[in-house]
Image (cartoon, grey):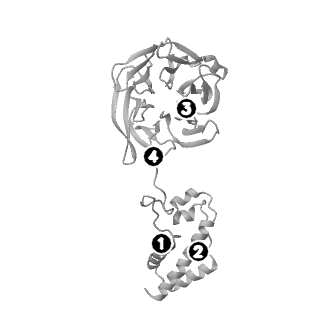
Amino acid sequence: MSLGVAGGCQDLVRIAVHRRERFDAGPVRDTRSLRFWGPRQLETDPTVTRPRVTEEEELVMNHHRHLGLAAGPCIVVIACVLLVAGCQDGSGPGLVTSPEGKPAYDGAKPPPPPPADPAIAFYVRPAHPPYYLKVMDADGSNVATIYTSTSLMLGWPSWSPDGHSIAFMDGSPSPDLWRIDVSVVNGAPVGSNATRLLDRTTSIWHPAWSPLGDQIAFVDLQQRTIEVIPAAGGVPSVLYTSPVAFGLGLAWSPDASKIAFVESPSASEISLHVLDINDRTVTTVLGSEWGQQLGGGGPTVPDWARTQDMLAFQGPQGMIYTMQLPSGTPTLVAEGNWPTWSPDDREILFTSPRGSFTKVNLATGLITRLGSGMWPDWRRF
């Protein structure tokens, strides 16, 4: 390389370092934009602030444009000079190692994504089939399809307590009871071994996996029964037969001794009850008059808190409530549908009226958006 080219590279190295320092110190309104920052985004993204070129820099760069300085050799020289300088004094972008001596994140590239940890199962229904059963991490990342169907009856997922399987319903015109295994392969969630556990001509709804992991509860809408079946499949047994029609939803208590359910003899008469598994007694915890006082409808799609005797449910006008058991006063939480508790009971995830998943912290009121879908179920552990 000629001395002119070498001298030009030295000037540009000085400018590059100077501009890097000024850029690092400059205002950036959204640091997330830096992760995929590039020339095109720099020109079009208003969230990235571009440092201005000083007169000295402009003179030097114009001087080397007239010299016909080639960009390729200068880039190589700049990279080499900065790398050598960093290795010599420890201030440059030299290779950073972990205490074990392995390469670690050096601040110049985006960190690798977190490993998939499926925590929330949900259903997605586009305008036309196919329809999807999906999972995602608790923060909304690593969304993956684990099952696909052409049936509109696909849905109502329920995690096994070990987080390795999901029970759900699928099939037309009357949905059947299914289960599918969920694992992480090469960093991504996958579904496997989809198995039909029960096939009937009547409609099987609201599968709910017991916290003990040994059985799955469900509702037979036509026979008006709440039943349980071994988690691996087998002969179901009836726990309760209702004199009236069921509403939406089943939910196990944390110790698997009780099941919350909804009865709905009419659209204006919807009540919430708790079934004791041991003695088969039924207790009404919220009568239909509560919903009637609020303009119609009533409690539906209950979910039992993971560590305490408290229910979350959907009330009239599409509002989410919580209620302490055995029979407390409903507390309004937010507007939405299909609530599900976090494992520590600090948050509730639900579907907003616009169809997006919303997570609310019950102590702080902090709202987090995670994506979109229906019938979410947050695994217990």
Q: Which residue is mark 3?
A: 339
Which secondary structure, mark 2?
A: helix
Residue identified by numbered label 1: 87
Q: Quadrant of residue 150?
A: top left
Q: Residue beneath label 2, please?
A: 18
- In the image, which is nearer the foreground, mark 2 or mark 1? 1
Q: Residues within 10 Å of mark 1 (few under 14, many from 20)?
A: some
Where is residue 245 shown, x and y percent of the image?
50, 16
The kind of residue on which mark 3 rests is Pro
State left or right for residue 361 relative to residue 237: right
Q: Nearer the viewer, mark 4 or mark 2?
A: 2
Number of marks present in the image shown: 4
**Mark closest to the chain's N terminus, 4 or 1:** 1
Picture disc at residue 142: 4
Q: Secondary structure at mark 1?
A: helix
**What residue type is disc 1 on?**
Cys
Pointer 3 or 2: first along the chain: 2
Is disc 4 surrounded by few (<14), some (14 to 19) or many (20+) residues within 10 Å? some
- The residue at 39%/19% (across/down) is 202
Looking at the image, which residue sits at the far right?
A: 293
Question: In 3D space, how far apart are the residues under numbered discs 4 and 2 (Cα atoms)?
Answer: 39 Å
**Foreground pick, 3 / 301:** 3
Q: Position of residue 84 (x, y in %)?
A: 47, 75
Marks 3/1: CA distance? 54 Å
Q: Secondary structure at mark 3?
A: strand
Q: Quadrant of the N terminus?
A: bottom left
Q: In the structure shown, which secondary structural element does the residue marked by tag 4 occupy?
A: loop
